[in-house]
Amino acid sequence: MDVFEKCARLHPVMELMDAGFNVYFREVQSAQGAEAVVEGRTMIMLGSNNYLGLSEHPHVKASAIAALEKYGSGTAGSRVLNGTLDVHRQAEARIARFLRRDDSVFFTSGYMANVGVVSALAGRNDVVVLDRHAHASIVDGARLSLAEVRRFRHDDARDLDRVLEACGDAGKLVVVDGVYSMEGEIADLPRIVEACRKHGARLVLDDAHGLGVLGRDGRGTAEHFGLEEEVDVVVGTTSKALPSVGGFAAADQEVADYLRYSTTNRPFVFAASPPAASMAAVVAALDVVEREPALRRQLQDLTRRVLHALRRMGFDTGRSQTPIVPITVGSMELTFAMWKALSEEGIFVNVVLPPAVPAGSCAIRMTLTAALAEEHVERVLDTLERLGARLGVIPGRPGLAGEEVGRKAG
Ligand code: PMP
């Protein structure tokens, strides 16, 4: 049997694309702010994680350009050898200061940060305890570690308590997302912290979507709950509110040094470091996060307004409290119909399909950004209400086309 046989089969996504649902790999031909040019058309961009709109901020761009001029395009090596530039250390110190930690360790992506942190901190005799909805990078880190992996029910601290109890005396590493990236829910950190404390477990918080967005000063989910001292390691990404590429772990000095020097932290040791321009963009974006708190307040107000408006219209937006706004549509066919209609109206959204959600609970996923102007918000809300009613996406308000699509979905 040829191992490549699987490659010859038509992937379901390719079948969808053949049917005119070009949902993935759309080519973006511009910066991604409130709007973006996508395959030749200007669209309202609700599909990026550029939460504060900083990827086009003049200070961020100028800093990245200056670093590119000074250091060239790449680092050509691992952090451990030739790939630590002074800008890596500056960014690590800035992130640590911002998050009130001793130190931070910078990785080439947020994905690699989770894989490295979890696999380096959990060893052969330990147990990694994960939420059932944990991000793929956390799951992969747990797989790479030699530890046993156990799961608890999504955001259920009582179930976490039960799982931790059953771990006995083993070393326990609990890893949770601060904000769940498909649902936009904020984790129940107070009760998770309580369970960890009760059982002597260490807690890693992946705050990819909380950083820069939640908390009065943008320090994320732990700040939002006033629990910063209770979290042992904060993992973050610099591909979202801080619009660059990279990821980090912020912790006490001992833990940071261990992550820096241990060869069990394989994504850190065995991969090239991020280029200087990316690091300069991170530092500059942190400057803006600290200097322009109004951007975050604007995003928090926008989030409340949009969630309230959509819920009043009757859309099912689940338990989201963040700029991640999912709309549960139902069948895959109806979800694609809604996606296509929005796309034709010039609104870029993403679709969420199984296995990310249960079959029959497919969703449209939007992310809000502080870059959106009033006219964008109004257009998005008006269009969603009109299309939602027409297609029957709003529960209890079956529309004509929705019935047709629903029957076809069968
Ligand atoms: N954690 C979470 C919760 C995420 O949503 C993501 C990215 N979507 C990551 C980690 C990985 O971050 P990056 O894209 O920077 O690799």
Image (cartoon, rainbow, N blue to C red):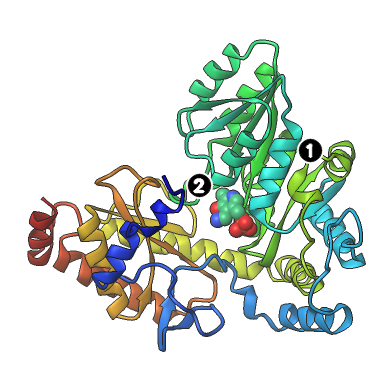
Of residues 122 and 214, the one nearer the viewer is 122
Disc 2 or disc 1, which is closer to the eye? 1
Amino acid type for the residue under numbered disc 1: Thr
Mark 2 vs mark 1, CA separation in Å: 27 Å
Of residues 392 and 15, the one nearer the viewer is 15
Q: Quadrant of residue 110?
A: bottom right
The quarter of the image that holds ligand 1 is: bottom right
- Badge 1 density bin: few <14, some 14–19, many ≥20, Cα 10 Å: many
- Residue 4 pos. (x, y %): 45, 53
- Residue 188 pos. (x, y %): 53, 36
Residue corresponding to mark 2 = 180
- Residue 203 pos. (x, y %): 68, 32
- Image position of 172 with respect to 296: above or below: above
Tell me: 54 left or right of 249. Answer: left
Label number found at residue 264: 1
- Residue 127 pos. (x, y %): 65, 23
Q: Quadrant of residue 201?
A: top right
Residue found at x 36% / y 76%: 347
Count of marks, rendered view: 2
Res. 228 in view: no
- Image position of 172 with respect to 167: above or below: below
Q: Quadrant of residue 19?
A: bottom left
Tell me: 120 left or right of 298. Answer: right
Which label's residue is closer to the chain start, 2 or 1?
2
Of residues 172 and 304, the one nearer the viewer is 172
Amino acid type for the residue under numbered disc 2: Tyr
Label number found at residue 74: none
- Image position of 177 with respect to 107: above or below: above
Residue found at x 75% / y 70%: 278
Residue found at x 86% / y 45%: 260
Q: Is mark 2 within 8 Å of ligand 1?
A: yes
Residue found at x 70% / y 49%: 113
